[in-house]
Structure formats: C-alpha cells, structure tokens
Image (cartoon, rainbow, N blue to C red):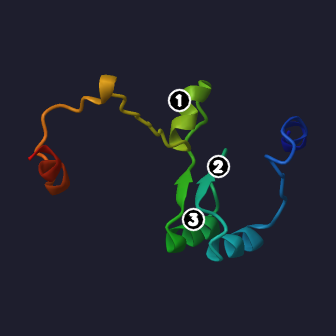
C-alpha cells in the first residue's frame, strides 16, 4: 500500500523497509521525532523512543482527516494592525515629539 500512496505523493513519502534493530538505531540517532504506528510497536522500538523522548501514537487511525491531522500540525495565527489615518489613540509623547510641539 505504501508504494501506491508514494506514487501519488512524489517526494513527500518515501517508503522504507527496515528491521526493528535498524529503526531503533535511527531513532537513537535522533532521526525520528514522532512515530505514528498502525499497529503496536515492538518493545525494542518503545524503549528506543523512550530514551529519545519520541512521541508514539499507536491508537487506531481516525477516518476524519481534519481530526487526525491535529496531532501533527501546529496552528499559527498572524495578525496585522491597520489604523485609519494613522491614529493610534492617545499616547504619551516621546522626547523628540515633545521638543517639536514646544
């Protein structure tokens, strides 16, 4: 199945087949920060993740993609302030502004 998904998403998903030993070594090197499993991982993988503080998500996958993605995406909000006519409200004058007005 991974090959068919990888064909649809080139350069985004690269399927890898590896043993628990090589995967545990990769986790130990810090190459993995979060692990999503479709089945329960082995004790060796769990120990490797515990030593590197890697989050393991091994609950059943949720059919609703928007909810499933909440575990992996960080929401960010960007706000821009625009003030009509440059009026920013009442503020104390800085020393340079005070010198101009006196």
Q: Is residue 16 above or below residue 31?
A: above
Q: At x 46% / y 40%, what residue is drawn? A: 76
Cα distance between the residues tagged 3 and 1 = 25 Å
Provide the secondary structure element on which disc 3 rests: helix
* Disc ID at residue 67: 1
Tell me which label, 2 or 1, sits earlier in the chain: 2
Crowd around label 2: few <14 · some 14–19 · many ≥20 (10 Å)? few
Residue found at x 58% / y 37%: 60
Q: Can you say whether 96 is above or below 7 in the image?
A: below
**Which is more foreground, mark 3 or mark 1?**
1
Pick whichever of labels 3 and 2 is earlier in the sequence.
Answer: 2
Q: Position of residue 65 (x, y in %)?
A: 61, 28
SS at badge 1:
helix
What residue did someone put label 2 on? Answer: 37
The nearer-to-camera label among 2 and 1 is: 1
Badge 3 is on which residue? Answer: 46
Tags 3 and 1 touching, CB below 8 Å: no
Judge the density around disc 3: few (<14), some (14-19), many (≥20) Cα neighbours within 10 Å: some
Q: Residue at x 86, y 39 (%)?
A: 1
């Amino acid at each position: 199945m991974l090959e068919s998904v990888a064909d649809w998403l080139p350069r985004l998903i690269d399927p890898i087949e590896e043993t628990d030993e090589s995967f545990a070594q990769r986790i130990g090197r810090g190459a993995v920060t979060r692990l999503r499993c479709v089945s329960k991982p082995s004790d060796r993988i769990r120990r490797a993740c515990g030593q590197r503080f890697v989050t393991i998500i091994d609950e059943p996958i949720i059919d609703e993609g928007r909810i499933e993605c909440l575990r992996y995406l960080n929401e960010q909000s960007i706000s821009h302030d625009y003030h009509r006519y440059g009026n920013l409200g009442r503020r104390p004058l800085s020393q340079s502004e005070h010198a101009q007005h006196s």
